[in-house]
Amino acid sequence: MQASPMHGESVTRGGPCYDRAKEAEEFHETKAGVKGLVDSGAAKVPRLFIHPPENLHDFSSGTDGAATSLEVPIIDMMGCRDSRRQDVVDELRRASETWGFFQIVNHGVPAAVMDGMLEAVTQFHEQPEGVKREWYSRDDAKKFRYYSNGDLFWSQAAAWRDTLLFDFSCGVPDPEEVPLLCREPVFKYEEHIEKLKRSLSELLSDALGLDSGYLGDLECMESKRIVGHYYPICPEPELTMGTINHSDATILTLLLQNNHGGLQVRHQNQWVDVSPVPGAILANIGDFMQLVSNDKFKSVEHRVLARRAGPWVSVACFLFPGGIRKSKPYGPIKELLDENHPPLYRQTSFADYLGYFHSRNGLNGESLLPHFRMMQTSPSPGEFITRRDTVYDRAKELREFDETKAGVKGLVDSGVAKIPRIFMHPPENLHGLSSNTNRACLQGPIIDLRDCRDSRRRDITDGIREASEAWGFFQIINHGIPLDVMDSMLEGVRKFHEQEVEVKKEVYSRDGMKRVRYFSNGDLFQSKAAAWRDSVLFDFQDGVLDPEAVPPICREAVFEYEKHMVRLKTSLSELFSEALGLGSYYLSGIECMKSETLTCHYYPACPEPELTLGTINHSDLSCLTLLLQDHHGGLQVLHENHWVDVVPVKGAILANIGDFMQLVTNDKFKSVEHRVLAGRVGPRVSVACFLSPGWTQKTKLFGPIKELLSENNPPIYKETSPLEYVTYYISHGLSGNSALPHFRMSDSK
Ligand SMILES: [Fe+2]
Ligand SMILES: [Fe+2]
């Protein structure tokens, strides 16, 4: 978070916290786009543009053999009005069904018109910043505008490109609204594209087995938006993307590209390079065509790589039902439906379609189509869960899983040999899953509490300070909790989860007000992928819990263990206060870890542990978490960018710093990211005791502790209440991502 608002070096890289919103704002303010970054001599890609590994997946397709043998179909339109019509129609049908993508030659758009268009786009982007910034705008009402990354403020990572937009969606714009430099080339190009569109509309109608005028009458591709992309040379193309993978929300997109390449389409699960063919126009089927053709024609995923060579310039013309047809409902074409081809999609308007897109803050590459699919009709339990098919009704499967109230344990008991799709995690979650050898030498700190009341107190507070600063995590031994109390607790939890479903489902609930409840995946309906675990929770809040509310099978164990947790908490509260250089009773005084919640997890053995997680990586919202785990292992903490296995130490209690402690200590103590792997062997049982501000303090404001602040250590965080913090976390669906950056002061550091 640098102070300089200049582009170039304004952007920090690495570092656990950075203010993305601020950097996006600063980049936007330059109005110079990516071209401006390159011109300022940026030798590294700013953090804003760095993509997560999953976006960069399978990057160098063309070089590894398989993909190079595939070539996007080329369709020659010569003779399409007479002698070759049937051939052209057949080729179009095949290409639209199998690839959703093709190159067109002999399309009738003169080479000079295409060259003129590409040249105008290139020249516009290569003008002095001062000239083009006049046109920089994110106002969608403008018929002509220039900008970088239409989704800059909500995408996960920005793309390495700048864009010019000519909006013909409500007819031909007033020439005065278009800069002189581009005026003639774009109006000429549009005229020719209109002719090509009419031919293609007829040919595609024929290819669908409809009357030639069908798609024309449907008015589904009446609107045009012409978009001129400029992809500057990129110094680190392996870290970013020209355009993230996506499918177009159009009926059809027609694309003109210069000779630099970089475009790839996804075909049979491979990324295939689209080599530039001189004079060709590329066409790709969009989502809306897939919808009206009832899946006959396929909307194709594509992306653009950033390149060291360049600039790559392209001109995309999007054809869609916009303007006055924006709210007209479209559904699968009736003539394509019969008993064997029931409608797969419900009716929707283009406005609704885009509205859904914006309500989701963009999709970062996901298709919108599944949302508009009709519900399928077979809800048979057990087999209800589809796996790798391209479209599945996630919401429905989650509901069905939840309604079983049998949890993951229920799935395992029913004999599933494969994990259901809802539990399959995207590759980025599974990153670094298997242990690697250079990690084995790392061992988290162990704090021995023996004699902590006298001779060793100073050593212990020093140890806690070091561990909390460097790791945010440590194991505690000689903490005073008898081994049999810990064993009984683990045993009680295991027995609870292994009861008959009929018994435990009595307490199955997602009601956060219930202080005793059993559930599977607290964030089941919010998270991207479910975790392979069930939980039972005992919320002691400020210390009182009706014993009758706790299931008899684990009642005694829970209350006995809780009693010891309170004692340990009291000791640790003093030791942490001293480790911070505060009076021994400071932390208990501010009541930041007054309440205890015991969350007891059961991680059943998993048939495919490489596809899912026991718990996704996250940091805890609490001040401090005390964890008891059995001998199975699977817990990992992130330390110096490596996942480190926390090898179970018999009799130890694990402690980890939570977000709220990091906030009140003004970043002195670090909240640690951790996760639990799913395992082939199990069940793994663990008991987490979350120590957080008490229930009665949920609206009390907490900020960095004043005694820890000085001129050199100004407050990094704003004051916030536990309620506000948790609400922000939940409402932003963070599931794993820390909410701390949101509460940082914008001018800190
Ligand atoms: Fe696209
Ligand atoms: Fe945790």
Image (cartoon, grey):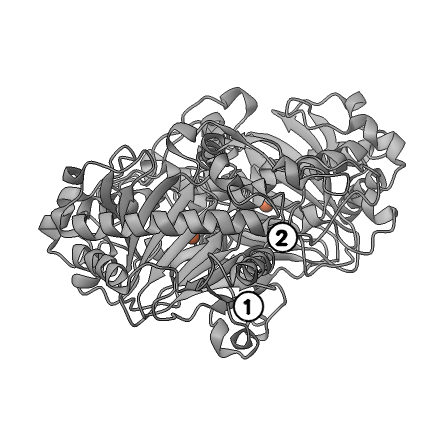
Residue drawn 50% across and 41% down? 213
Which of the 4 image quarters holds residue 14? Answer: bottom left
Residue 669 tag number? none
Amino acid carrying label 2: it is His
Q: Looking at the image, is mark 1 or mark 2 earlier in the sequence?
A: 2
Q: Is residue 657 visible?
A: no
Residue drawn 27% across and 67% down? 233
In the rendering, at what x and y percent does residue 311 appear? Answer: 26, 66
Residue 442 tag number? 1
Q: Is residue 39 above or below residue 406?
A: below
Residue drawn 55% across and 57% down? 89
Q: CA distance from mark 1 to mark 2?
A: 27 Å
Amino acid carrying label 1: it is Leu
In the rendering, at what x and y percent does residue 168 appear? Answer: 30, 39
In the rendering, at what x and y percent does residue 454 appear? Answer: 54, 48
Classed neighbour count for the residue bearing mark 2: other residues with Cα under 10 Å, few (<14), some (14–19), many (≥20): some
Name the residue nearer the viewer: 632 or 404. 404
Name the residue nearer the viewer: 541 or 33. 33
Name the residue nearer the viewer: 557 or 532. 532
Name the residue nearer the viewer: 124 or 424. 124
Q: Provide the secondary structure element on which disc 2 rests.
A: loop
Q: Which residue does the numbered mark 2 point to in the structure image?
A: 425
In the rendering, at what x and y percent does residue 414 appear? Answer: 87, 46
